[in-house]
Image: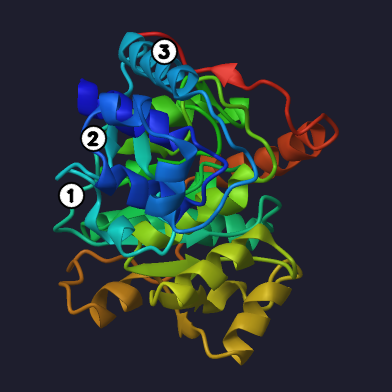
Amino acid sequence: MDRSNLDLAIARMTFLKAHERVLLAQSLDRADDLAVLSITDLEKIIQRSFPRKTWQSADLLAAAERDRVESERRGISFVSYTSDDYPPLLRELPDPPTVLFYRGTLPDPEKPLAGVVGTRHPSSEGSRIAYEIGRDFGKSGVAVVSGLALGIDSLAHRGNADAAAPTVAVLGCGLDSVYPASNRALARRIVECGGALLSEYPCGTLPLKHHFPARNRIIAGLSRALVVVEAPDHSGALISADFALDQGRDLWVVSGCLATHAAEGCRKLVADGARVARNAFDIVADWGLRVPSVAVPALSICPANALSFGTRAAKLLELELQTNTTVKPTPLGVR
């Protein structure tokens, strides 16, 4: 508990950069070490100066205790960078999260994850393909990691779950809530099917705009390869693509979406050298994994409810975008 409180307190030191928080966590052993740490001591560890000359470590430790208690009350677990259970791929990031909160089961580090991202406003073709990509990765024994956003993210999660794969969703808010609220049932299903909801933010954190690019680095970081299904120019999915390239991950786009009006960003990725796949099985085969013998033809028709979900999701997003970005999301529930 003492080590946990130390890591939770360091995670709340947002005036430090992510890699500085990790460095501090590696330099201290107990919460008491933080309690007696002076600004001068901190500057020596981080190797840079701070404008402030005093700080209240007691306030950070009190907040950390509240985070721990509230997480336990809600059935939320957490793993820190100093823990053996921390996802090994995230250790490779230049800015790894100090603490990762989760509901469900952390992904198996011995099995590859496929990141799937795209627009919140998919075309009917993009909706169909996103669902099938998630489903066919699942049929191949590969879990999908995405951001639980409306549109491509949700459809890929849903297809993966329909294939009984432990899909992983990374959120840009605390796990006491789900954003967008319309995906609350999907979030529950992800946990129930053996997957996980992940976040670097403690309970009570709202889905602020700047949290989502930070979330995207975790999606890319957990992935062996990132697949961009359908993304217009300046899409947030392209931020994930940049992270994937910076992190040395493979980057793919799907051929079936390249002609749609919402795929301008995908076409630019191809022009810049991204690889093109017909379907999830192409990527699985490229990894040297066995493609299931029952593999369905590329881009076959998925259940009608998946298509209607994609259309409905786009309309829901339009309504949400008319509200303030800091609107409090719907609670997932207390366990």
Residue annotated with mark 1: 108
- Dots 1 and 2: beta carbons under 8 Å? no
282 versus 270 height, above or below: above
Q: Nearer the viewer, residue 191 or 79?
A: 79
Q: Regarding mark 1 in the picture, which secondary structure is present there?
A: loop
Residue annotated with mark 2: 105
Tag 2: amino acid: Thr
Pinpoint residue 317: horizontal percent, then vertical percent: 73, 38
Which numbered marker is on residue 277? Answer: none
Mark 2–mark 3 Cα distance, whole angstroms, equals 23 Å
Tag 3: amino acid: Arg
Residue annotated with mark 3: 66
Pinpoint residue 260: horizontal percent, then vertical percent: 70, 71
* Quadrant housing the C terminus: top left
- Dots 3 and 1: beta carbons under 8 Å? no
Identify the residue at image location x=34%, y=52%.
23
Identify the residue at image location x=33%, y=75%.
283
Label 2 vs label 3, nearer the camera: 3
15 versus 294 height, above or below: above
Q: Nearer the viewer, residue 151 or 53?
A: 53
